[in-house]
Image: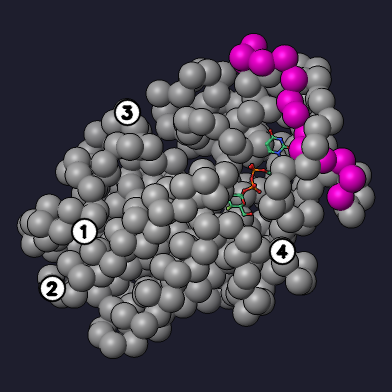
Amino acid sequence: MTILVLGGAGYIGSHTVYELIERGENVSIIDNLQTGHLEAIHPDAKFYKGDIRDEEFLDKVLQKEHPDAVIHFAANSLVKESMTNPLKYYDNNLYGTMVLLKSMLKNNINKIVFSSTAAVYGEPQNIPILETDPTEPTNTYGETKLAMEKMFKWTSNASDIKFVSLRYFNACGAHENGKIGEAHNPETHLIPLILQVPNKQKTNIKIFGNDYDTPDGTCVRDYIHVSDLAKAHILAIEYLQKGNNSNIFNLGNGKGFSVKEVIETARKVTEHPIPELICQRREGDPAKLIASSKKAQELLGWKPEFDNLENIIRSAWNWHKKHPYGY
Ligand code: UFG
């Protein structure tokens, strides 16, 4: 198979490229390197530097590669930034997707798998969250991802494009080879921020609120390893290649861990005391987000291999201690 990966220099994109190449697939990457890293690009992938909003550029790559399927990670994903600069998110996430769909139609490419997020649900009404639960995003990022899903839905209704949308819960961890991992700037995610303490970049980890309605008062999340997410994309392509219809899947472990439990596990893994500091709640954080991934298990045959938080944090630590400042 020839697969075109948009955003293949980013965190989840680069892990998916490694997974595809390890399976012997032919991979091309488009990335504008605004948040992605040149060093994260697999040496055996073909790389086109450019922006998916550039229709002429995208048309040229699609014509040249004519991929069997596209995997689309090229989006902005910072919740806080999306609230202060919403139009950046509409432009890159939504307009970028529109240009992509136009180009796919023009070039008769009809299979696509793309990143969505738990943020489409907003404050969940049920735990674990099902794909059929109400979608009421509480931030612009989630809103643009939900709008992307709808754009795919209506476009696929009117054409032969088939899509799979994957709603990730909390992506974390790093490739076991230690060569690629999480490197955001600014970093906002809990596990890399915790690991900055044993890496001597800061003296404590802030806990955003300990008065939530959860067993220890801190927020509960469903942490899912990036390599398990990567594998789900490949299963989703296979699912479309078998002739199945478009679909939407949650991807999580189905287990929740509180912020305090994550910090405690990181202390064990790093053998560092990692002091904590209780702070105010962060605006817009739901108390609990846990996925039901039953549908992905049943229809895609997906089963996360990293179902243990300690192993997930160990893999993240393996990356961060060797790359304290990212790539
Ligand atoms: N947290 C802290 N201290 C920190 C950083 C985070 O206590 O320094 C807490 C947060 O309040 C939250 C938990 O740790 O309760 C996890 O926070 P992350 O920022 O790592 O992840 P989120 O759950 O906020 O975000 C994830 C995805 C987003 C997605 C969102 C949906 O990373 O892409 O879920 O709500 F939009």
Amino acid on which disc 1 is placed: Thr
Q: Gap in Å between the C-alphas at discs 3 and 4?
A: 37 Å
Q: Nearer the viewer, mark 1 or mark 3?
A: 3
**Would you identify the image quadrant in which residue 46 lies?**
top left
Q: Amino acid at mark 2?
A: Lys
Q: Which residue is mark 4?
A: 123
Residue at image coords 12%, 60%: 59
Q: Is residue 300 left or right of residue 239?
A: right
Mark positioned earlier in the residue sequence (2 or 4): 2
Task: Give the alpha-carbon distance from disc 1 to disc 3, as whole Å.
Answer: 22 Å
Q: Secondary structure at mark 4?
A: loop
Q: Nearer the viewer, mark 2 or mark 3?
A: 2
> Residue under circle 3?
39
Residue 2's disc is 1
Rounded to the nearest angstrom, the CA distance separating label 1 from label 2 is: 18 Å
Residue 236 falls left or right of residue 205: left
Q: Considering only order in the chain, which callout, 1 or 4, is on the residue closer to the N terminus?
A: 1
| Quarter-of-image position of residue 91 | bottom left
The image quadrant where one finds the N terminus is bottom left
